[in-house]
Image (cartoon, helix red, strand yellow):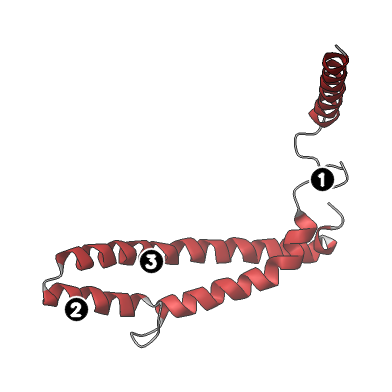
């Protein structure tokens, strides 16, 4: 009997705590680390924007490089051609799928680069997101 009473009391305590936590977080669907609203993250994005821009530049340079550069579209095209000439159909198919994806990255990254340039302009006019 004492064990049952302890179990019931423990379950009630846990239920009460979980219920209170659920009510506390119901006001803000995305609470920050200290329970404050996170907002749109403008200050953090403004801080990281130069590094993101550099990373996009680096990736685009690699994709547009010649066949001697690992990760370039030209090098993968060369590998697809080699697999085709060797009659390795499965390898050619696999590499061709990778080539299709890699080619699709270029317009996506260029769009992100343009959007990021707009973000950086916004950050300069809004005190790096501090006055939003």
Q: Residue at x 76, y 55 (%)?
A: 42
- Image quarter hosting the N terminus: top right
Q: Can you give x and y, in whole percent of width and height, for residue 3 in the image?
A: 84, 18
**Most distant residue in the bottom direction:** 68
Packing grade of label 1 (10 A; few <14, some 14-19, many >=20) is few
Give the quadrant of residue 13: top right
Cα distance between the residues tagged 1 and 3: 36 Å
Report the side of 51 relative to 55 (left or right).
right
Q: Residue at x 81, y 63 (%)?
A: 128
Packing grade of label 2 (10 A; few <14, some 14-19, many >=20) is some
Q: Which residue is mark 1?
A: 32
Give the quadrant of residue 90: bottom left
Q: Can you give x and y, in whole percent of width and height, for residue 93 in the image?
A: 22, 62
Q: Residue at x 81, y 31 (%)?
A: 25
Q: Nearer the viewer, mark 1 or mark 3?
A: 1
Q: Nearer the viewer, mark 2 or mark 3?
A: 2
**Most distant residue in the front direction:** 1
Cα distance between the residues tagged 2 and 1: 52 Å
Indicate whether 104 appears above or below 72.
Answer: above
Find residue 108 and name its label. Answer: none
Q: Can you give x and y, in whole percent of width and height, for residue 95 in the image?
A: 28, 67
Q: Secondary structure at mark 2?
A: helix
Q: Nearer the viewer, residue 18 or 53?
A: 18
Cα distance between the residues tagged 2 and 3: 18 Å
Q: N-terminal of the two: label 1 or label 3?
A: 1
Q: Which residue is mark 3?
A: 102
Packing grade of label 3 (10 A; few <14, some 14-19, many >=20) is some
Q: Nearer the viewer, residue 19 or 12?
A: 12
Find residue 82 and name its label. Answer: 2
Q: Residue at x 85, y 63 (%)?
A: 127
């Amino acid at each position: 009997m004492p064990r049952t009473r302890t179990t019931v009391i423990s379950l009630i305590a846990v239920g009460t705590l979980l219920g209170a936590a659920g009510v506390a977080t119901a006001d803000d669907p995305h609470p920050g680390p200290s329970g404050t609203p996170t907002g749109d993250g403008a200050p953090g994005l403004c801080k990281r924007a130069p590094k993101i821009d550099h990373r996009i530049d680096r990736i685009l340079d690699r994709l547009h490089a010649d066949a001697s550069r690992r990760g370039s579209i030209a090098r993968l095209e060369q590998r697809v051609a080699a697999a085709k000439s060797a009659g390795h159909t499965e390898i050619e198919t696999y590499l061709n799928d990778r080539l299709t994806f890699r080619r699709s990255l270029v317009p996506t990254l260029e769009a992100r680069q343009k959007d990021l340039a707009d973000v950086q302009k916004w950050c300069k006019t809004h005190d790096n997101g501090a006055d939003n």
